[in-house]
Amino acid sequence: MANDFLTVADMVADAYDLSGLETSEVRAAAPVIAALPAIPASNGTMHKQSVMTQLPVTGFRTENAGRDFDHSVDRIDTVDLKILDWSWAVDKAVADSSRLAGGREQYIAREGMRHIRSAMWKLEQQWIYGTANDAAGFNGLTDSLNLNALADDMVVDAGGTTASTASSVFLIRRNSAECGLVYKGDGAVELGQTVVQNFIDGSSKNYPAYYTPGCGWFAGFFGSLYSVARIVNLTEDSGKGLTDDLIYQALERFPAGHAPDMMIMNRRSQFQLRASRTATNATGAPSPIVDSVAGVPILTTDAVISTEALVS
């Protein structure tokens, strides 16, 4: 049976008492977030975890002869959680006159649902692109010093050269120590009561509105050097799209017995992979859409863009 992790989408659903259908809509807006494990922060709005960087030296010895003792080496990684805010307000007169079946309450809830979907989408973008997506947010995959240069051990270069047309594929290991989301443990999702407040419009005029506060503290965590690999500079230049060879090069970067369990890409990269198989099969017949390679499932998301800067 596959792992069934607690996710941020689950906690949002619980906090808002959503039906199954509505929860599914939140997940569909951010498929990566729905697939990631979520763990509580170790210390409020800060999360620290140990990463082993060196094994102790061991060895054989002969009878009646000793050997030197050694020790393992660890470092402490720290991530700071950031506030994701999806508070919303609606004009009281508009909500009170709503013709929706549930009236005012349904109108407020519908607007809240749309804010939640937007927040989950924002969270997914941040988890991938970090401060390049929103400087006020937490660090993401592309902020990692292990994934932002061609010289990095876990980076594979597709060789595209057309500026601002690039994309990436990320191969990740999901578990509570390597890749996932961390949330403030005493309240991942904070939802206040809907109240009537005075709001001021863009012309400094007053009007009454129904205001509902909603927010949460979140950050991404990305484990160690061998937790993520990235294929970069995937473009529409001839022969510079995604291929099986590039994926296997990325898989080769992981240690034996330490394989990734998910690939994240956009639809362009998935179609490039399919096209590369069509061009090389015996009949030339179109290849079906590829949903996994070497047993690693593919997850597509629009949060991975096709306008990245080239990585050098």
Image: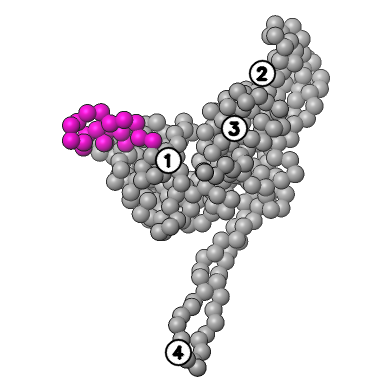
Q: Please tell me which of labels 2 and 3 falls first in the chain.
A: 2
In three-dimensional space, the C-alpha distance between marks 4 and 3, rounded to whole angstroms, equals: 60 Å
- SS of the residue at dot 2? helix
* x and y percentages locating residue 127 in the rendered image: 54, 41
Q: Please tell me which of labels 4 and 1 falls first in the chain.
A: 4
Number of numbered labels in the structure image: 4
Query: Which segment did they paint magenta?
Result: 273-291
Q: Please tell me which of labels 2 and 4 falls first in the chain.
A: 4
Badge 3 local density, few (<14 within 10 Å), some, or many (20+)? Answer: many
Q: Which residue is mark 1?
A: 297
Q: Nearer the viewer, residue 202 or 211?
A: 211
Residue shown at the point (42%, 38%) measured from the top left: 298
Asked if one can make out residue 87 in the rendered structure from this viewpoint, the answer is no
- Amino acid type of disc 3? Met
The disc placed on residue 110 is 2
Q: Which residue is mark 4?
A: 62
The disc placed on residue 120 is 3
- Amino acid type of disc 4? Thr
